Image (spheres, grey):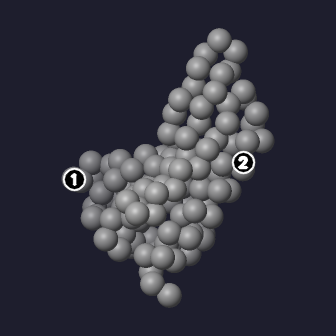
Amino acid sequence: MDTRLEYQNLIKSVLQNHAEYRATLNDGYSSQLIFDDERRQYLILDMGWNGDRYLHATPIHISLIGDKVWIQYDDTEEGVATDLMAAGVSKEDIVLGFRHPRIRQHTGFAVA
């Protein structure tokens, strides 16, 4: 199987699990999955009302760039990279895009 297609499926599965977990929190907002296979962008969008406060946030944003999985944003406690690796994505294929390029070499993940 094509690695990119395999990674697409793994990303979608991991994000689905995160969205289902977020739904159990029931803080007055919903978590929506946004999958754009053409542009290779995958994210969770939280939106809704929590009392008087409106929430519109993207807690997880992942891109497929070339043959690498780029975590563009991660606002989870454990880190979505851990879930991606548990699902079968190689650590060498994960780039922490939200980390400055000079720091990436010290993360243990791919540089770019």
Q: Quadrant of residue 46?
A: top right
Residue farthest to the top, as pictured:
52
Q: Which mark is residue 21?
A: 2
Which amino acid does the dot numbered 1 rest on?
Answer: Arg
Secondary structure under tag 1 reads helix
Q: How many marks?
A: 2
Visible in this render: residue 68? yes
Which amino acid does the dot numbered 2 rest on?
Answer: Tyr
- On the image, the x and y values in percent for residue 87 come to 60, 71
Task: Name which residue lies at 27% across and 52% down.
Answer: 103
54 vs 67, left or right, is right
Q: Are marks 2 and 1 in contact (CB under 8 Å)?
A: no
- On the image, the x and y values in percent for residue 58 come to 50, 39
Dot 1 crowding, Cα within 10 Å, few <14, some 14–19, many 20+ = few
Q: Which mark is residue 102?
A: 1
Marks 2 and 1, Cα distance to the nearest angstrom? 34 Å
Q: Nearer the viewer, residue 66 or 98?
A: 66
Secondary structure under tag 2 reads helix
Q: Quadrant of residue 110?
A: bottom left
- On the image, the x and y values in percent for residue 74 come to 48, 46
Query: Up-down: is 69 above or below 32?
Result: below
- On the image, the x and y values in percent for residue 76 come to 56, 45
Task: Name which residue lies at 35% across and 74% down.
Answer: 67
Visible in this render: residue 108? no
Task: Name which residue lies at 28% across and 64% down.
Answer: 111
Name the N-terminal-most of marks 2 and 1.
2
Q: Nearer the viewer, residue 87 or 62?
A: 62
